[in-house]
Image (cartoon, rainbow, N blue to C red):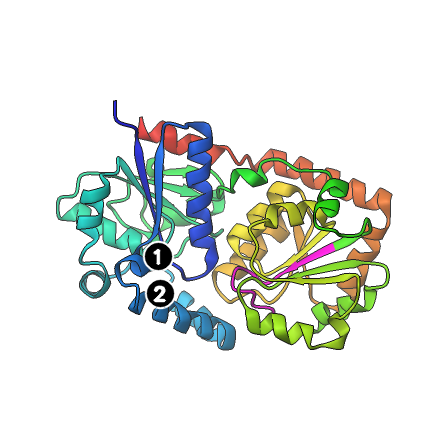
Amino acid sequence: MRKKRVLLLSEGFGSGHTQAAHALAAGLRQLCPGVRTKVLELGNFLNPFIGPLIVSAYRKTVSKQPKMVGLMYRSNYKKSLNRFTQLTLHRMFYTHTSQVIAQLRPDAIICTHPVPNTVISRLKRLGLNIQLFTLITDYDAHGSWVSQEVNTYLVSSDIVKNRLIEKGVRQDRIEVTGIPVHPNFWQTRSKEEVRTHFNLKQMPTVLIMGGGWGIIYENSALAYMTSWRESTQLIFCVGSNEKMRDKLLADSRFLHPNIRIIGFTREINKLMDAADLLVTKPGGMTCTEGMSKGIPMLFYEPIPGQEEENCDYFIQNGFGQMLDSTDTADRWLKLIHDRDAREQNRGELLSKRNEQYDPLTCPQAVLRLMQ
């Protein structure tokens, strides 16, 4: 009997979409080793020259003009992509999608970005007979995700479910599964063990992340944290942003034995285990990973649009706060230096997480739906 095949399609506009695809693929294989998975950033795969140029332009816009990104997000918030846009996308970038599907012969396709979701929906209208699942990777539901051809939406929360219903999606086509995290995040290791692994000191530790692109803005509260470097270990993770890494290394405030600056790593799960506090851009994927680890979070500089919605969700549910002042930084840094307060806070976060989130729910739902 042929093994079940799942094709997961994403795009590189922010690392979270592809991370979610890989996380779900790994979760499916973990729960059912007989399932075969393939993750593709479809536009980059079909157009290896043009695709990265578009992603690079988007990255620069996010970095330099985040308000423009928010304006674009809000201006089309309630709208699906129209037929003309769908046709244009297909002819410019995705004309060979049918050939990819015919070659891989998947039993189901899961889209973690609106663009491949639109492309596969169009192919289904033209006769493609395949199950299409759409995993929304934030705590909001933009209209660009919506398509009548989607069999099931996998969403992060009841809030997203209700927003899809408001946009005309049938309730029986929506499952609240949470955003999947990689199996590496399913369990937590001891801080002492992980700190030894990274040659870190056994002291209160803060992990500061800028997302997969390492976008750490000129944020006074982040720089202020370096004033705690004598008593606090600070790990700045800048992802693939080498310019930001060089910039921090050239700043005397960041040159200290208790400050570590690292680039791209596949061990974020372990770094979260080592940390007592996570300071991050509120991307849907990173926040979900932080929640799964039961680590308190401070959020900074949300991009207008989905990151603002992510931020609101995690603050309202008690998993974090906005890093809006040096007073906020001081309050949390003092808390992680107080062992009793730190342990009490962690216990409360783990209790909330257990009530609201189970990382197995999403891959289990996909396996059930595929039957």
| Mark 1 closeness class: few <14, some 14–19, many ≥20 residues within 10 Å | some
Which residue: 26% across, 35% down?
Answer: 107
Residue beneath disc 2: 76
Q: Is residue 320 left or right of residue 32?
A: right
Q: State the extent of the magenta-drawn residues as a range.
A: 206-218
Report the Cα–Cα distance between label 2 and label 1.
7 Å
Where residue 249 appears, as percent x and y from the top left, is 68, 72
Q: Which residue is mark 1?
A: 143
Looking at the rendered structure, the secondary structure element under dot 2 is: loop
Is residue 207 in the magenta section? yes
- Magenta: main secondary structure equals loop
Q: Position of residue 351 (x, y in %)?
A: 68, 35
Please report the residue visible at 61 percent of the width from the left and 46 percent of the height from the top. Answer: 269
- Position in image of residue 65 (x %, y %): 48, 77
| Quarter the N terminus occupies | top left
Is there CB contact under 8 Å for labels 2 and 1?
yes
